[in-house]
Amino acid sequence: ACLEECEKSGCVGEKCFQHCKFSSDGKPIDGPWYLQEPLYQKWKQWDCRSDCQYHCMITREEQREKLGNKPIKYHGKWPFQRVYGIQEPVAVAFSALSLAVQFHGWLSFFILLNYKLPLRPDKKTYYEYTCLWHIYAILAMNFWFWSAIFHSRDVELTEKLDYSSAVALVGYSLILAILRVFDLRDEASRVMVAAPLVAFVTTHILYLNFYKLDYGLNMKVCMAMGVAQLLIWGIWAGITSHPSRWKVWLFVVWGSLVVFLEILDFPPYKGFVDAHALWHAVSIPLTYFCWSFVQDDAEFRTSTLLKKIK
């Protein structure tokens, strides 16, 4: 009822929106599209229905709070407080921090391999998993970028890009875990392991984008792949003599907390921090632990190979 009234009057209570005002021929009074602000300047502006949905939700939640009722979901999402047009400011901030930590970890790994550790005569690295970790870095930074965009503005395109990049990252992380734990170094073995998993992940992404964005199914698929890689790393850490195995244990324990927060679902505190925002927060040190182990692993494997050559 609030939405219908808002779209007719352009107002929720005493608050009115320019986007909801139309001329007699049904065109926005702001003028034709080519006279309006460019997209990059309009990013923080919201259209009529979005503004109506948000302010009707806020008004309704204020009424419920006065009656002592707990928050409920609107249009499938918890009621978040917008800040400067950003839909979920805390999640955006944590996503941006994770992106920065991810970039720093990858850059440190790159510098270590190319400028601090010895190289082969052909100028290639001794570490056998260099290329695999570079691909991981690209997929991870891509995910955190789209995560920040999606949480700042939730539309169909940003939602699909966020979910697709998340599936790609989780799927590739599982492939990487198998290749590293089982020490698969020849191309034939790597292709045999990666091909079916790449096919599965690609099919799932296509299903989400072009058939149905099934949130429940996507959660089950990502959880299954996430738990599988944690088990693989955890078992390996228990039997290996790797000098940095304690970092793997830390990664597994911290990763389990991340999985728990992804399952947990509670309304945002003060309209800002919910379980998903906390998931983004605990992912920041997880990223640091991950790249710290990767650098240690590169040093350990390089040292082992050099001893064998001598």
Image: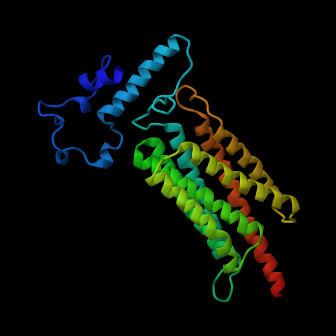
Tell me: residue 206, above or below residue 45.
below
In the displayed structure, 231 sits above or below 301; it is above
**How far across and how far down the image is residue 106, in percent?**
61, 63
- The C terminus, quarter of image: bottom right
Q: Position of residue 231 (x, y in %)?
A: 77, 55
Give the camera-side residue of 91 and 204: 204
In this rendering, position of residue 31 left or right of residue 241: left
Q: In the orientation shown, which residue stands out farthest toward the left?
A: 24
Q: How many marks?
A: 0
Query: Which image quadrant is residue 182 in?
Result: bottom right
Q: Is residue 257 left or right of residue 55?
A: right
Residue 105 appears in the rendering:
no
Rendered position, 120 above or below 204: below
Viewer-closest of 140 and 125 = 140
Point out residue 2 in the picture as x, y percentages from the top left corner: 35, 20
The quadrant in which the N terminus is found is: top left
Determine if residue 127 is in view: yes
Which residue is drawn at the image coordinates 79% and 76% (left, top)?
303
Q: Residue at x 56, y 12 (%)?
A: 68
Q: Residue 270, located in which quarter of the rendered image?
A: top right
The way the protein has been coloured in the rendering is rainbow
Q: Nearer the viewer, residue 11 or 232?
A: 232
Work out which residue is located at the far front of the displayed protein and give it. 211
**Could you tell me which residue is drawn at 67 percent across and 54 percent down?**
225
* Residue 275 locus on image (x, y percent): 61, 35
The residue most toward the top is: 67
